[in-house]
Amino acid sequence: MSRSLFFFGIVLLLLPSCTFRSKAKTERMEAVVNEVRDRYRADEDISNDDQIFEAYDYFLHAKDYRNAAPAALYSGRVRQAKKEYEAAMNCYQEADRYGRLTGDSVSAAFAQYYIGDLLNNSGHEDKAIVNYKAAAELWGDSLSRKAKCLNAVAMMNIVIEAYDSAFIYLEQALQLAQTSHDPVTEASVWNNYSVAYQLTDDFDAAKDCLRKALPLVDVKRRPIALMNLAKVYLALDECDSLEYYKTAMLNAMELTECRPETMAAVYAFLIKEALANDDYATAFELEKKHEEVALDILSDQTQSSVLEIQKKYDFETQANQHNRQMLSRQRLIIVLIVVLMIALVIITGLIFNALKKKRIEAEINANLLELKKRNEQQRLEQSDLQTQIETLQKQTGDRLKDEYLQKCHIIRCFEVYSRDRNNPMGFKDLEKALFEGEDHWTGFEQAFEGVHPGFIDSVKTNYPDLTESEFRYCLLSHFKLSRQEYADALGCSVYNIDKIRASLNNKLRI
């Protein structure tokens, strides 16, 4: 009994010390998180602050999710500083989850914003918009932070060329930034306004926006603002202003340590200016420097897609929630399904073969019937074709015979009338033979050429300006006709016959 009391007393003595040590470690881990947070906000290098990982693991093990949320958040910032983007994405997602769980909207909002940055850097601007909007909603009444998130949404819309949406979010961000008296965010909004106007070829508006942004920017962002103004003046071809802001940009770069992305943008602008001035040597040298910076930036980027990492993380989180005790039952169900599928395949094969035989027999019978019909149809068609050919040959022979007899009759009438021009019956027969059809003048000329070969060609060659009536009058003049007979033959009046005769006499005399 006394021994039990002794041990119980020792436990009572050690318990306060254990509690004190636990409280002291919690405070120490909180101090680590605060230290990393302060260093990050001061733009110091945090890539070597590995103690944040110990703090994160400690709070998770202690199930202190209120402190685990900011610890996960700044663990993600350290991971990102180390270029460990997959681990950074996991940390941000954990920070978002624990922040929402404990009501820490600040950690959740920062996590959503940083997830948007990772997606943006990996080329998934449309996905980043969702996270930036979520961050803006989580900030609630913090107008300055919400303005920054909406400005990021507008920037993503500019990148994907959704300019109408970009201008809407820029207007909202500008109002919030001015209301909260946040010059840094306001300057960033004006700068994004200028980018949107430049991409829509409104350089005057872009210039005005950049002039509004320039007094608001700090030393670190001043080179970018000056470069944007110089780019606008380059587009407007205003050389003096271009040289002034370019010089100011280079001077501002000497006063601050520029990021590689900023250096790449500056080199790209200087290359564009050199090419505009046809200074290809300078452009070539600048291109080499730009390529070196671009390669450094590219080497820092992750090889895997951040979007795929996010999807993989979500899938694994959901998969861990399934009940693994259902595995044996699922295997039994799979075996039964396989057996049923095999039986179904066999039955389907038998039915398919039977139907295939019936289909083949039906196709053979149909082909035989169709062949029989075709043979019968071909025989009838050949019989009809032979009958049509015989009828056509007979009709053609009769027509040629009639045409030949008619031509012979015309020539005979022509010869008779030529021997005896005073015989009125001869011309009447000739007129009746020639003028009863539509092409009687063609038949008349053919008959005339048979009796007087070469006369028609001679008249057409020597007197090409004769009218059709004058030419026909020349042919009819070989016959002894009265003025009325001329008029009847040519289908005109006696008065017109006199005009034709007078005109013909003038042309033949000439």
Image (spheres, grey):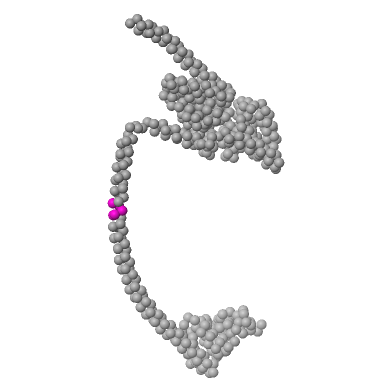
- Expressed as whole percent of the image width and height from the top left, the position of residue 274 reads 68, 39
Where residue 81 sits: x, y (%)? 55, 28
**x, y percentage for residue 384?**
36, 77
- Which residue corresponds to the image point at 63% horizontal and 29% vertical from the top-left? 258
Q: Taking 494 as reference, is 2 left or right?
A: left
Nearest the viewer among 75 and 159 is 75
Q: Position of residue 373 (x, y in %)?
A: 32, 71
Residue at horizontal 54 percent and vertical 19 percent from the top: 35
Residue 461 visible? The answer is yes
Q: Is residue 504 visible in the rendered structure shown here?
A: no
Measured along the vertical axis of the image, is residue 332 above or below residue 421? above
Q: Quadrant of the N terminus?
A: top left
Tell which of 219 and 452 is nearer to you.
Answer: 219
What is the count of numbered marks? 0
Which residue corresponds to the image point at 42% horizontal and 33% vertical from the top-left? Answer: 316
Q: Quadrant of the C terminus?
A: bottom right
Nearer to me, 106 or 240? 106
Residue for point 37% across, 77% down: 382
**On screen, 466 above or below 93?**
below
164 is within the stretch colored magenta: no
Main secondary structure of the magenta stretch: helix
Which residue range is magenta in the image? 347-351
Left or right? Give the position of 4 relative to 21: left
Eyeballing the image, is 234 above or below 134?
Answer: below
Q: Quadrant of residue 275?
A: top right
The quadrant holding residue 2 is top left
Nearer to the camera, 456 or 72: 72
